[in-house]
Amino acid sequence: MAGKRKRGAKDGANTLSSGPKKAKKGKISTHLSSKPDIEKKPFVEAPIGDDRRREADLYEMLGSEDENDRIQAADCIISSLFDGEGASEAVLQRHLDRRLFRGLASGRNASRIGFCLVITEILAQLFGEKDLSKTKYTGLSFDKVLGLLAEKTQAVGNIPGQEERDYFLGQLFGIECFVKSKILFRDTSKWDSVLNLLLKLGNKKIWLRPQCGWVLVQALEQMDQANAAETLSRIAKAGLAKTPEGAAAWIVALNRFPTLQPQPWKNPLSSKSLPDLTAVLKESFKENGKDINDKSQNGGKHASWSAQLHFVWDLILARFLNAKSDKAEEDFEQFWNRVVDDGLFSKQATDGQKFKGFMVFQKMLEGFIEVPSKVQSLFSRNFMSCLLNQASKEDRYLHRAAIKALKSIEVVVSAHPSSLTPVLANLIGKNGVYGFDQRTSTKTVDRLLQNINKENAEAVLAVVRQPIKTLKQKEAADAQSIVRTYADYLAKILNAFASAPSTDDEVEATKGSFGPVLQELAGLAYAQPKDIPEDALTEQIREMCRSRLESSLAKLARSSKDFALFCEAVASIDASAKNMAPEIKKSMDDALARMNKLLKRKSKTQSEKETAQGLAMLHAISIFQLYNDDPDAMEVLDDLSQFYNRLKEKKANKDGEQNEGSSELLVEILLSMVARPSSLMRQVSQQVFEAFTSQISAEGLELLTGPLASGESTKGQKELFNIDDDAMDVDESEGSDGDEDDQVEDVEDASDFEIDSDMEFVGLNGDEDGDAASSSDDTSPQKNKGEWNNPEELDEVLGKILNSHRLDRDVDAASSSSEDNMSDSEMFALDEQLSAAIAPRIKSSQSDAKRAKKDAKQSVINFKHRILDLLDIYVKNEALNTLTYSLLVPLLNLMRTTSAKPLANRACEIILAYQKGLRKARAGKESGDDALGADMLGLLVQIHDEAGKDNSHAYAKAASAASLVVASSMFAGDRGAIREVAGVYAKTQSDWVLGDVTMQNSFFADWNNWCQNHASQSRT
């Protein structure tokens, strides 16, 4: 015990003693992180104490990653060395020797960058215009200073690789300081010394050559022609002319002195030099490396895989950008084909060289994007072949590089939409593939087409249409593939226009550009274009075109704020493209005339304008359905004609009252639209309903809420959609075992799928979205084991088993033996054979019935989802309308009776949204002017009756919200009504306590909270 206590005391002592140590470390770090003394005072020759600490802090600050700190420190050091009489030669040499040149070999933070600032300025002071090395610091000659640099950055002995790398980089940065100080060409001997050191350094390590070449290029910018010629000669003698750095030096010299063309390059970009330039820019170093050890350690493969592109490509890009058109010897297309396409992308090129080629392509594309003629050259044969192959599959070695190149194309075209036409023409044209996205498994062309606008629309459409001219020369399968891709491109262009911003000016522009594309796609969907062979435009492709056309119009309806744009888009479809019966043609012409009148109708208020445009939109969608051979389209057009006539009568009436039955007729039309498996129908119906919400009557709302009470079964489907009795007899007979079994089946099916409000309907015949895939079991010639497609086949099988035949085949049949002589074992064997033959048909019939019941249930649930979409719109627009109260009880009843959880959740969300919207709308009105329904107290009682029928938490939350909506409205209209409301709550609570109803206590907790809030407001 004592030992434990003693050890604990010892631990406690250590804990206590650690406190001051941490504080001490904190003080030290605070001192180092604080700004040093940057007072500009001369440095002393032998610093001690504060002077030494000041120097250390200044050089610490000089290596900071913060650029402002580095500049401040450099300014203070330079001023402390040269201001006034300046520091002594010994002080300056000490700083150069022990601080600056030695610090260049440090890889800490940004030390090299900061130290280079000071060294460059010191060299300019010593050997520049002031030439202090001859007047004041005579002991610091150029050779001595350069020797100090070489000495302090010399890698000596067997040192680690990273340390050796730091020394080499330090020497390189030091040489760059001499070049940046612009002191080397007053006396060419200085440049000779620096050049010797630079060439020596470049030959030590291959990875240093690009950096050494960059320093050399900076020096060439400061030379006269004679010095440049001599420098190029020195490079050639060193064997570095035929390297990327050598080519860069020749290009820079050629830019400054066009007449200077020494051997061996003369002009690296001329046609004669391209073979050598191709070999050099592959950066293979196998022939150029002088040091055998370096060559084995830093071979060409390592250099070729560098993620950083050599700076020579920037010089080449700048040279071609600034090249004059009369320079025939420098042709970019020839350069690209020889150096890049036949070099970096040739069949013999390594993966590293192809990787470099992709980076070169990105750089050139960004540089030449405003020069279409040069952009055209970039998409060459070998490059496109490599791009397509590498982008098509993820397991390809250069897949990521190819995808990055495609991304760069998308980014560049997005920033420069004018380049869309030449880029698209190359991707899907000569060297590309028309079905580019399918070949590469990307969405490149899809994203590029998003940049279409009124300026480039015509040119882009011409590019997309190009292969259509050659269809007659293609095989049927190839022609069909081209037409399918062509239709897909047209749909993407339509979608791009539909998604464009819809300002007034842009709407006018969109109309002009949208029309031709819509005509093209509609021609494929409904007609036989002259330039497309009949065998190329199959019915399957036509159906795809109709689907694409419908989805494009749906997107246009969704994004356009003005209904007129959608109506004009439908009206622009060439009516002659579709063969119609005379009566259908007349109905469509009449509908078009009514639609145009509605669009041109002058309205006094915004509400009247929206009503007219909404009715015009209904005409437009019905006309479109006529094109698609919808059997119900004619009936809808007749209903719209009636509604149009009633609207005219309403306008003629001075009182402007709504004609009786108009609201119900509109709701019936909208319900017939949302019942169809079409996103376009759903979108249009919601937009039109939103425009008509203020005109919906109580009877119209009853039509909306009525289907919510229908059962989610085959019987409910029959009630809602008027399914033929014959179609329902099988399902009802299969489900005649009892209602309980049917309910269990529905609950079980409910767990098999989740319904979303955006999901399409199951068609009335059981097929999803009109897709024939779901009915493939019925139409397929193949059959499962034990199943027969016709009764005759079953008769034959049973005849073989029983050794019998049908009565109508007595003439052809042989006489059969009597069954009286069969033994028991033979009878049992016969029974098993009969069971094996008949059982699969019974099982198949049961599975078909089960699937039909499941499909019927899903169609009813989806239809209820669409109705909830409309009710949600009504609640948001008509929060203060007294008719909205009538929605609460049907929504609660739906929550309680549905077997689909998403449907119940959606109903709950609508009630909560109504409560929130009503509170917000009431806050913007003056108190006491709330309109109330006819029997609000009766509605409250009805809601409380519904609340006691379900004990779930979600249902209690929705019921409480509905009850408080009515209670709040009654209280806002008449504060004395609170007594009646409290009486209803008291009765419900009494029934709950006595066990007559089951509900959550949160229902009453919400009521108490509501009372507390209003009580506190009354006191204030």
Image: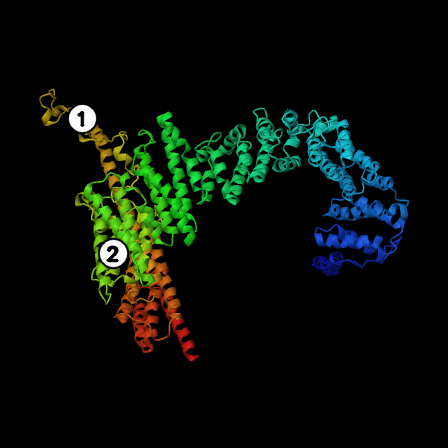
Identify the element where label 1 is drawn: helix
- Percent position (x, y) of residue 33? 73, 56
| Disc on res. 956 | none
Q: Quadrant of the N terminus?
A: bottom right
- Percent position (x, y) of residue 472? 36, 27
**Mark 2 → mark 1, Cα distance in angstroms:** 57 Å
Q: Quadrant of the C terminus?
A: bottom left
Q: Classify mark 1: residues with Cα within 10 Å, few (<14), some (14-19) or many (20+).
A: some
Quarter assignment of residue 993: bottom left
Q: Classify mark 2: residues with Cα within 10 Å, few (<14), some (14-19) or many (20+).
A: many
Q: Can residue 422 be seen in this view?
A: yes
Please state which amino acid type lies under the numbered disc 2.
Answer: Leu
- Percent position (x, y) of residue 565? 35, 50
- Which callout, 2 or 1, points at the residue further toward the start of the chain? 2
Please state which amino acid type lies under the numbered disc 1.
Answer: Glu
Q: Can residue 901 be seen in this view?
A: no
Give 778 or 240, whichever is nearer the viewer.
240
Identify the element where label 2 is drawn: helix
Residue 70 falls left or right of residue 866? right
Q: Which label sits in the foreground, 2 or 1? A: 2
Task: Check the image and name the residue furthest to the front.
Answer: 326
Task: From this view, report whether residue 489 is shown above or below residue 276.
Answer: below
Q: Which residue is drawn at 77% across and 54% down?
A: 73
Give 969 or 582, whichever is nearer the viewer.
582
Q: Residue at x 25, y 50 (%)?
A: 593
Task: From this view, report whether residue 1015 is shown above or below residue 142.
Answer: below
Residue 417 falls left or right of residue 1011? right
| Disc on res. 666 | 2
Can you identify the residue that label 1 sits on? 796
- Percent position (x, y) of residue 312? 66, 35
Give 941 or 629, whichever is nearer the viewer.
629
